[in-house]
Image (cartoon, grey):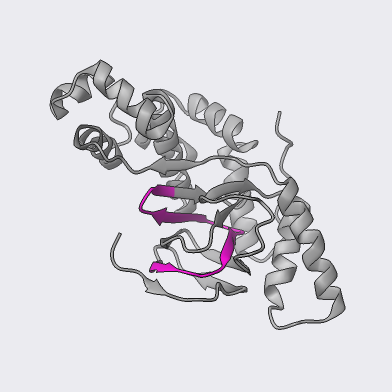
């Protein structure tokens, strides 16, 4: 990543970001929790990209150099925590599930950042308790280091609908299927199909945030059918792409997000 600016304190506040807005690489001496009630938030570090729709938040540990990008309109809720206070015990960026209670706690806490009254202290205590209980939901595109692996990843990042096999992609990159399969496991901790699904979901969330139709997203991201895309999306996020889009529009328009079905 480019040279990062140093902003010692991680702010606690709400910041509106228009679609496509970026915040350049920077680091804090504090931990930070980032939550976007609408759109999709992407956080990029030297280790890769983490992305979160409105049902997820991203934990960024103190000292981590990171850049933000908004896909769709974001009301970005930022919550800073001192470096000696780590309720999650996490040393790397992590995507967290945000349930209805945690969502409202984050919203309430970040909207009054200068309030230091006793009620705010109680709110903070409950918020930290909810964070400790929040499940981790890894939605992460790691950054490859091996040039052969990077060549394959670049091809699919530019065209996630490319359905070629790993062997065919490897022939273009100058590496065998077995070698590439091993590299996906050793560098990313996942198989090639798992990584490709993560990549397609990332592109899908970006397109949905920009208002693309579900059928268009399914086609452009490489799923064999719209129903296959809906099934993968539901299993990953607990609701359909259509429900996700409705929720984003509701939050952007200032209404309460609709109740989503519970995870099966």
Residue 98 falls left or right of residue 176: right
Residue 160 falls left or right of residue 176: right
Q: At x 67% / y 71%, what residue is drawn?
A: 110
Q: Quadrant of the C terminus?
A: top right
Magenta span: 23-49
Which of the 4 quarters of the picture holds residue 136?
top right
Which of the 4 quarters of the picture holds residue 162?
top left
Residue 237 falls left or right of residue 8: right
Asked whether 187 falls inside the magenta stretch, the response is no
Spot occupied by residue 130 in the image (x, y as percentages of width and height): 76, 53
Spot occupied by residue 140 in the image (x, y as percentages of width and height): 46, 42
Furthest-front residue in this view: 84
**Residue 205 visible somewhere in the drawing:** yes
Asked whether 38 falls inside the magenta stretch, the response is yes
Q: Quadrant of the N terminus?
A: bottom left
Q: Provide the major secondary structure of the magenta segment.
A: strand
In this view, the residue in front, 253 or 20, is 20
Disc tally is: 0
In this view, the residue in front, 199 or 11, is 11
Q: At x 38% / y 48%, what residue is drawn?
A: 47
Residue 81 falls left or right of residue 225: right
Q: At x 60% / y 29%, what residue is drawn?
A: 235
Which of the 4 quarters of the picture holds residue 196?
top left
Spot occupied by residue 127 in the image (x, y as percentages of width and height): 76, 60
**Residue 164 visible somewhere in the drawing:** no
In this view, the residue in front, 103 or 208, is 103
Q: Compared to 69, does 238 lie above or below? A: above
């Amino acid at each position: 990543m480019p040279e990062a600016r140093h902003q010692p304190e991680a702010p606690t506040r709400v910041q509106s970001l228009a679609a496509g807005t970026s915040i350049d690489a920077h680091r804090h001496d504090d931990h930070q929790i980032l939550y976007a009630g609408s759109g999709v938030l992407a956080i990029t570090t030297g280790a890769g990209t983490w992305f979160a729709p409105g049902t997820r938040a991203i934990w960024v540990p103190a000292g981590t150099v990171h850049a933000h990008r908004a896909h769709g309109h974001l009301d970005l809720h930022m919550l800073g925590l001192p470096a000696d206070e780590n309720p999650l015990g996490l040393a790397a960026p992590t995507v967290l599930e945000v349930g209805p209670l945690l969502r409202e706690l984050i919203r309430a806490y970040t909207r009054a950042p200068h309030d230091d009254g006793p009620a705010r202290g109680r709110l903070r205590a409950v918020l930290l308790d909810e964070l400790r209980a929040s499940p981790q939901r890894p939605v992460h595109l790691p950054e490859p280091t091996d040039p052969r692996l990077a060549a394959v990843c670049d091809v699919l990042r530019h065209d996630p609908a490319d359905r070629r096999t790993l062997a065919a992609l490897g022939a273009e990159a100058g590496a065998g299927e077995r070698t590439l399969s091993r590299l996906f496991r050793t560098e990313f901790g996942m198989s090639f199909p798992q990584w490709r699904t993560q990549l397609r979901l990332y592109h899908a969330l970006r397109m949905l945030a920009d208002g693309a139709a579900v059928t268009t997203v399914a086609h452009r991201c490489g799923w064999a059918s719209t129903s296959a895309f809906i099934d993968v999306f539901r299993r990953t996020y607990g609701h359909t792409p259509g429900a996700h889009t409705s929720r984003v529009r509701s939050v952007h328009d200032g209404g309460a997000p609709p109740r989503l079905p519970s995870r099966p």
